Amino acid sequence: MRKAFSYLAICAVSALMASCAPKPGSLEISFNYNKQVGPGSNQYAVWVENAQGEVVKTLFVTEFTAKGRSRDGSKPQRGYTYRTSCVPTWVKHVDAENLTDEQMDAFTGATPAESGVQIFTWDFTDQGGKPVAKGTYRFFVEATYSGASVVTHCGEVTFGAPAADLPVETAYIEKSEDRIDMITDVKARKL
């Protein structure tokens, strides 16, 4: 009986892990996240655009950037509206002002409480879950450090291309030497 239970438990765990594993053909973006202290830190967004520069899908944006924070119980104002350094490229490209709160909810998540590796997967679908057209897409990871320094990591992936590690370029909009190690070792793989 014990052996049968162990076997069933192993099968259940294996099935769960397989269902959570990224699908072949997906794009996987990963990076090391070092939680920072101080105002304006720990804000980042991960998204994909088509060849025309239109946002196809936002995979993640930190909650403060998208929803803001209220300390007095009033409705919060979106963080990027009063801390304009919060991932400004994402804000502009996604046209954040014209997104509803419900649309923002679809990709907003809590800022990680602990440092560690963050992994995001894109399955070549748009924000509505529909498959995208064959072609080349640009992926972005943008981070705000200490309320002023902003860095963007980006690269390209082609829908239908074979599995491969993809090059990632890094560019600073504004660079401060303070705490620039919030996001490091950005990697992208076509699975």
Image: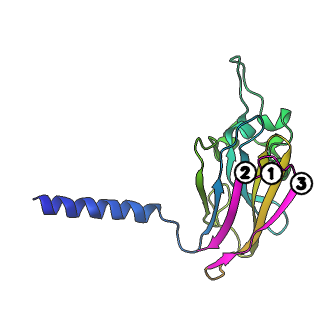
Lower sequence index among marks 3 and 1: 1
The residue that disc 3 covers is: 173
Q: Position of residue 151 (x, y in %)?
A: 81, 55
Specify the quadrant of the image occupied by residue 27: bottom right
Name which residue type carries label 3: Ile
The residue that disc 2 covers is: 45
Q: Position of residue 141 (x, y in %)?
A: 74, 57
Q: Secondary structure at mark 1?
A: helix
Name which residue type carries label 1: Trp
The answer to whether mark 2 and mark 1 are in CB contact below 8 A is yes
First to last magenta residue range? 164-191
Eyeballing the image, is 152 above or below 64? below
Q: Secondary structure at mark 2?
A: strand
Specify the quadrant of the image occupied by residue 173: bottom right
The residue that disc 1 covers is: 90
Give how far apart the Cα atoms at labels 2 and 1 are: 7 Å
Eyeballing the image, is 66 above or below 21? above
Lower sequence index among marks 2 and 1: 2
Badge 3 density bin: few <14, some 14–19, many ≥20, Cα 10 Å: few
